[in-house]
Amino acid sequence: MYKYLVRPFLFLLPPETIHQCIVIAIKFLFRFKLIETLFNKLYVVNSKSLKKEFLGIIFKNPVGLAAGFDKNASFYREFSSFGFGHIEIGTITPKPQPGNPRPRSFRIPKDKALINRMGFNNLGAENAIELLKNRPENLIIGGNIGKNTLTPNNEARNDFVYCFEMLYNYVDYFVVNISCPNIGDIAELQDQDTLMAILGELTALRAQKRVKKPVLLKISPDLNFRQIDEIIKIIEESGIEGIVATNTSISRMGLNTNKKRIDEIGNGGLSGEPIRERSTEIIRYIKTRTNGRMPVIGVGGIMSAGDALEKMEAGADLIQIYTGFIYEGPGLVNAINKAIIKMNSGSIK
């Protein structure tokens, strides 16, 4: 029903506009307990076989909502009723910032993809904390953290430390985002010395905490294998736990959408079906290179239950969706969880 009745109507409006409208509508509807109950009944799959222990945390299922959807921790409660096992908020920066000028999000339906250059638009760490103070205990929340656009790279470490300290008591794990293609010179933070300094400081701060919370690094699908080897070495030496693979891509190779339209859209990170294969390839490489030791959350181009299983077969411990949720609707989460149950029971190979 979503693909044939709801999506055509939604796609009449610009992506960012419809995103805001959906959030407002869902928050209004969920004021009525009956609506929340109905959504839970339709989309949530409860099964012991879905439970997954990852980095010491028990997830009710392996399917999460990727960062970028709930930038401000403003609707994670409502979206948990779509069946997600975890929701990653952010990217959160220390100070509020508007992001890049609009329009900054574009659909390319021929490729089942999005191009966005949002630019870490968010209301800042203090706002997120206020919204996380009374979160349900049974909902796993990840905190995706980054630097403010105006913060020079030689001071970026301060931004990550600030977000880490502020959010520490309110999220279950952290993701350090230094791979977004929409923040000026942020890619320079992937320099070995700079990245090691940032991650080293975070692990040193964590060592002072009563509870140890996992820290992962989100990487770009545009890295080559030599660069990935360097990232793996940095992760192992810094003491953080794992990798989120992958972020959006600056590549435009192999798209079905005509070049004129792509050129009109301009810069931005590509997500959706076109990056599925590369994301899976990177997950498989990381797992092979580390003999399966490196924890990985797989994200990138998951548009179907089959795509999700492909990521898990490549070695992803958990998966996250974003663009697939937009194109396929909330039923995608339900379908993936049911497919995982079948896989775990051995009824599909």
Image (cartoon, rainbow, N blue to C red):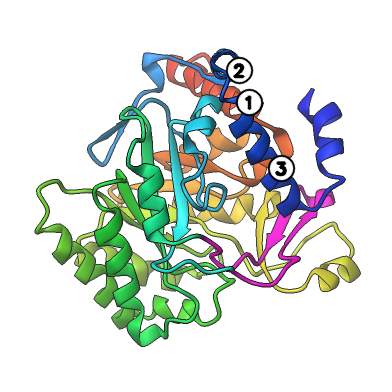
Amino acid type of the residue tagged 3 in the rendering = Cys
- Residue 185: % across, % down: 51, 82
Name the residue at 59% across, 71% down: 182
Amino acid type of the residue tagged 1 in the rendering = Leu
Helix, strand or loop at label 1? It is helix
Q: Which residues are magenta?
A: 99-122
Q: Is residue 111 magenta?
A: yes
Query: Is residue 318 positioned above or below 183 on the image?
Result: above
Left or right: 225 in relation to 141: right
The image's mark for residue 94 is: none
Left or right: 1 in relation to 24: right
Amino acid type of the residue tagged 2 in the rendering = Ile
Name the residue at 20% across, 61% down: 239
Name the residue at 37% across, 31% down: 139
The image's mark for residue 35 is: 2
Helix, strand or loop at label 2? It is helix
Say which quadrant the N terminus sits in.
top right
| Distance CA(mark 1)–CA(mark 3) | 12 Å
State which tag comes first along the sequence, 2 or 3. 3
Classed neighbour count for the residue bearing mark 2: other residues with Cα under 10 Å, few (<14), some (14–19), many (≥20): some
The image's mark for residue 29 is: 1
| Distance CA(mark 1)–CA(mark 2) | 6 Å
Left or right: 96 in relation to 212: right
Camera-side residue of 305 and 171: 171
Which quadrant holds residue 262? bottom right
Residue at image mark 3: 21
Q: Looking at the image, do the residues carrying marks 1 and 2 touch, with CB atoms under 8 Å apart?
A: yes
- Residue 247: % across, % down: 53, 59
Q: Is residue 301 visible?
A: yes
